[in-house]
Image: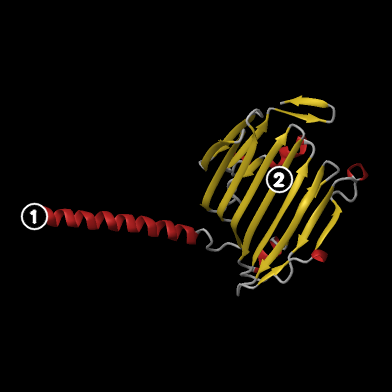
Amino acid sequence: MNWPRLVAAGTVVVCALLSASEDGRHLLAADIEAGEDAVLLEENLDIEIVSETLARVRYFNRTKVLTVRGVEEHEGASVSYNPSITVREMRGAVISPEGKRSEVKKQQIFDRAAFADFALYADSKSRSIVFPGVVPGSTLEHEYEVEMRNLFYVQGYLRFDLQEWIPARLKTFTVQAPASFVLRLATQGSPEYVREERDGRIVHRWRVRDVPALKTEYGMPPADDVDSYVQVYLKAFVYGEHRVDA
């Protein structure tokens, strides 16, 4: 029995299997875009809880549109604000299929009432971007930073969907808070998770890669039951002059 030959053959088989596995991952990454109108290349949501009365939210999105329908569905982006929420920064850009980058100009970023027909919500507004010159194959970027002086409103950001109606290459959700600030965490799905403690603060980070689009089916359960997500709950925050315990 020729052991060296068998060992060599086994090595070849193992290497072939590993190579096939790597090729499979690359093929899967390519297949999630097949037949889609757009693909989310990168999304980052970073929430910094400073205290029971202050938080900062930073958001970044990079999406490639693949079809005319994709252009129509992703022609703009917006963020809401009110007297307790200040938009510190908002900007965007369009990268053409040829790779030319064009920054969104100030006149293409505008404010408007979030609920124009409801006087009760007159102080609720949105800041919006309209992406110019978008064609299939373009990549759209937008990012913003908001500061919240009432953590009641940050709760709207504390659920992060790990799967979208379009495929996603990379999605990252980060929440950081003082070590003394108690958070409750819930996860549906299996994202990468890292917890770090530094300088008296705890940083939680979740990440997923190459996620296929969530598809609707006749008679399917509600999307919340089948979607993967991370939910962070505040144990307490201050609303006006009152401390609210969740």
Circles 2 and 1 in contact, beta carbons < 8 Å: no
Q: Which mark is residue 57?
A: 2
Residue 136, compared with residue 127, is above or below; it is below
**Residue 136, image x and y in percent?**
63, 70
**Residue 66, image x and y in percent?**
60, 66
**Residue 87, image x and y in percent?**
79, 50
Instruction: Locate the C terminus by quadrant.
Output: top right
**Residue 4, image x and y in percent?**
12, 55
Q: Amino acid at mark 2?
A: Val
Q: Residue at x 13, y 57 (%)?
A: 5
Nearer the observer: mark 2 or 1; the answer is 2
Q: Amino acid at mark 1?
A: Asn
| Nearest to N terminus: mark 2 or mark 1 | 1
Mark-to-mark CA distance, 2 and 1: 65 Å
Quadrant hosting residue 15: bottom left
Q: How is the image coloured?
A: secondary structure
Residue most extreme to the right: 119
Density class for disc 1 (Cα within 10 Å; few <14, some 14-19, many ≥20) is: few
Viewer-proximal residue among 53 and 229: 53
Q: Which mark is residue 2?
A: 1
Instruction: Note whether residue 185 is visible.
Output: yes
